[in-house]
């Protein structure tokens, strides 16, 4: 079994993440992977191009799940393609009314407590504060592998930390550096919104949360997403982690707006059998 993840693109200009789950080889039948996209904030063209990096096409996407409906997470241009390809889009109940203004009803799969994608694949949603309508974080459980995903959250609530345990990987927003935010050439109401409890996570807040998560997990990958182009800098983030969390630095991936991350292998590797010498 293998679970692979690639952040195809992340930032205020668009977000989309690929999760590819291969079923265990439990018999002569070979199953193709189950492919899920988290959010549809890139253009059709860019999504196709970046999937092609891994030799994949849109025809191989089995389902989509959305964190929320802001345009950098759901571009309305997807409506026709989703309908034509008959791709189910899993949307939390709190967003379902607004989603019907953007997508065809036939594509919308409304959920509240859990999304079950197969006998051994499920997603636990966690409601998070962001602007007026909130956003949804997820704990994916596929076979024995668990990973957490959360973006566009104003703060890290206790509920998220209660669920983000025993993870093999975590992807969390690391949106801004407070000093760059304060210095930025943007209206003060925007700065206040971003830095509020209903805005985005700073680099230090993401670091603090992941350090707590790591204490109760065996993290093989830490993926930082949704870095602000105007108010953040990957080198700054990298330096922060190298000095404050060197034990996690080797498993760190910083997602980019324009280039997909590597295809990260999330599943726990099986112990290599020790050969018998005699
Ligand atoms: Zn966003």
Image: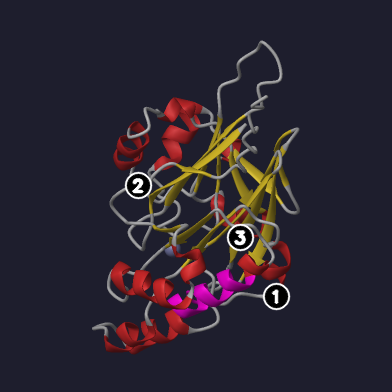
Image position of 175 with respect to 223: above or below? below
Count residues near mark 1 (Cα–Cα under 10 Å), then give few for <14, some for 14-19, many for 20+: few
Q: Indicate the position of residue 103 as horizontal and vertical percent values.
A: 51, 44
Please name the residue that numbered disc 3 is placed on: 137
Image position of 16 with respect to 208: above or below? above
Q: Which of the labelled discs sits on residue 260, or is there none?
A: 2
206 vs 175, left or right, is right
89 vs 166, left or right, is left
Relative depth, front residue between 51 and 39: 51
Q: Nearer the viewer, mark 3 or mark 1?
A: 1
Image quadrant where one finds the C terminus: top right
Please name the residue that numbered disc 1 is placed on: 158
Q: CA distance from mark 2 to mark 3?
A: 21 Å
If you read the primary sequence from the N terminus, does the residue marked by circle 3 or circle 1 appear first?
3
Provide the residue span drawn in magenta: 199-212
At mark 2, the secondary structure is: loop
46 vs 32, left or right, is left
Image quadrant where one finds the N terminus: top right
Q: Indicate the position of residue 168 as horizontal and vertical percent values.
A: 62, 52
Residue at 56% x, 22% y is: 32
Relative depth, front residue between 77 and 215: 215
């Amino acid at each position: 079994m293998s679970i692979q993840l690639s952040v195809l693109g992340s930032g205020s200009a668009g977000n989309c993440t690929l999760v590819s789950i291969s079923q265990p080889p439990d018999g002569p039948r070979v199953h193709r992977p189950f492919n899920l996209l988290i959010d549809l904030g890139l253009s059709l063209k860019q999504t196709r191009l970046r999937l092609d990096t891994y030799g994949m096409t849109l025809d191989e996407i089995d389902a989509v799940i959305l964190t929320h409906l802001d345009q950098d997470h759901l571009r309305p241009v997807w409506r026709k393609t989703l309908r034509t390809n008959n791709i189910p889009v899993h949307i939390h109940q709190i967003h379902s009314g607004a989603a019907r203004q953007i997508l065809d009803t036939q594509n919308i799969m409304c959920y509240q407590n859990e999304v079950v994608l197969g006998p051994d694949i499920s997603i636990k949603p966690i409601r998070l504060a962001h602007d007026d309508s909130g956003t949804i974080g997820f704990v994916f459980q596929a076979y024995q592998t668990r990973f957490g995903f959360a973006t566009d959250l104003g703060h890290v609530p206790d509920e998220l930390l209660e669920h983000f345990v025993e993870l093999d990987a975590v992807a969390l927003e690391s949106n801004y550096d407070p000093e760059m935010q304060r210095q930025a050439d943007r209206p003060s109401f925007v700065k206040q919104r971003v830095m509020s409890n209903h805005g985005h996570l700073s680099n230090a807040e993401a670091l603090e949360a992941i350090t707590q998560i790591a204490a109760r997990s065996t993290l093989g990958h830490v993926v930082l997403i949704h870095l602000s182009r105007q108010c953040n800098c990957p080198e700054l983030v990298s330096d922060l982690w190298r000095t404050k969390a060197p034990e996690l630095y080797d498993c760190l991936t910083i997602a980019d707006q324009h280039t997909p991350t590597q295809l990260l292998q999330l599943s726990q590797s099986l112990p290599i059998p020790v050969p018998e010498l005699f």
